[in-house]
Image (spheres, grey):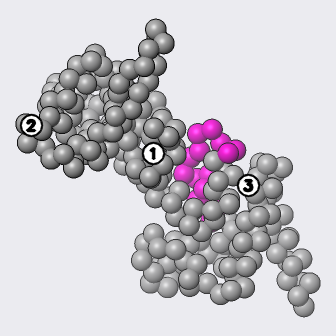
């Protein structure tokens, strides 16, 4: 399965459809179970006779494969939060409870990361693609900091602040509410920032360059 955001140390990742998932191999490792037994548990859950709907099984237990130590292709699953919850529901004991709590926390964090990325992608598609190229394991702030910086330079506030001021629904794109001039400036700065990300890794220095660039552009218009 292609990954939008790579697996963390707990096997949680985001797929190309912006869905947080967890690899069954990592679940077996963390819950101290043999992977074949985790596969057996998944088979029981997803069996048509179990009572679980085919639709739920299809959406929440995605078959994937991996190569084992003997170079053999083996079966595994990429589970959504709901699939994971269904699987570990019957896992008991102190360690199991500890890891259930930890995985719920990590799913929450990954889903928040996905929201940040989706929002950034809507506003600054070129920029977000280049950030993913620059960072092997991008963090939410890699996207939000850069987008907030551009928004503050052009409209004087972050997208979140703009939504609050203008009564716009959370997560909704602010583009339709901006002037043509603001959109044009944001698109121009996005292109400039793509180059600066490689040449100038320091955030504050990039910000100064971009502010200077905007000033130069505005002075040319006068």
Separation of residues labelled 3 and 2 (CA atoms):
54 Å
Q: Secondary structure at mark 1?
A: strand
> Dividing the image into 4 quarters, which one contains the N terminus?
top left
Residue for point 26% across, 31% down: 98
Magenta stretch: dominant secondary structure: helix
In the image: residue 137, left or right of residue 48: right
Distance of mark 3 from mark 1, alpha carbons?
26 Å
- In what quadrant of the picture does the C terminus appear? bottom right
* Residue 90, image x, y percentages: 14, 31
Residue 20 lies left or right of residue 46; in this view the side is right
In the image, which residues are magenta? 133-148
Dot 1 corresponds to which residue? 14
Q: Earlier in the sequence, mark 2 or mark 1?
A: 1
Distance between mark 2 and mark 1 Cα atoms: 28 Å
52 up-or-down from 129: above or below: above
Q: Residue at x 27, y 18 (%)?
A: 36
Camera-nearest residue between 155 and 183: 183
What residue is shown at x 38% (from left), y 41% (from top)?
A: 21
Residue 65 placement, left or right of 213: left
């Amino acid at each position: 399965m292609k990954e939008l955001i790579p697996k963390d140390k707990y096997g949680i990742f985001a797929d190309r459809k912006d869905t947080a998932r967890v690899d069954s191999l990592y679940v077996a490792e963390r819950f101290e179970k043999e992977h074949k037994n985790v596969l057996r548990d998944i088979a029981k859950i997803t069996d048509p006779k179990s009572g679980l709907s085919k639709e739920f099984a299809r959406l929440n237990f995605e078959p994937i494969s991996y190569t084992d130590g003997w170079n053999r292709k083996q079966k595994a699953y990429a589970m959504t939060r709901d699939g994971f919850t269904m699987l570990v529901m019957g896992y008991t004991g102190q360690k199991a409870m500890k890891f259930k709590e930890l995985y719920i926390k990590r799913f929450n964090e990954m889903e928040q990361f996905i929201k940040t990325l989706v929002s950034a992608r809507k506003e600054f598609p070129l920029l977000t693609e280049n950030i993913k190229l620059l960072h092997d394991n991008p963090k939410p702030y890699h996207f939000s900091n850069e987008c907030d910086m551009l928004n503050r330079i052009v409209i004087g506030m972050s997208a979140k602040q703009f939504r609050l001021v203008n009564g716009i629904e959370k997560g909704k794109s602010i583009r339709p509410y901006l002037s043509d001039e603001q959109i044009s400036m944001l698109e121009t700065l996005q292109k400039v920032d793509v180059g600066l990300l490689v040449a100038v890794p320091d955030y504050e220095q990039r910000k100064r360059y971009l502010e200077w660039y905007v000033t130069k552009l505005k002075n040319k218009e006068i």
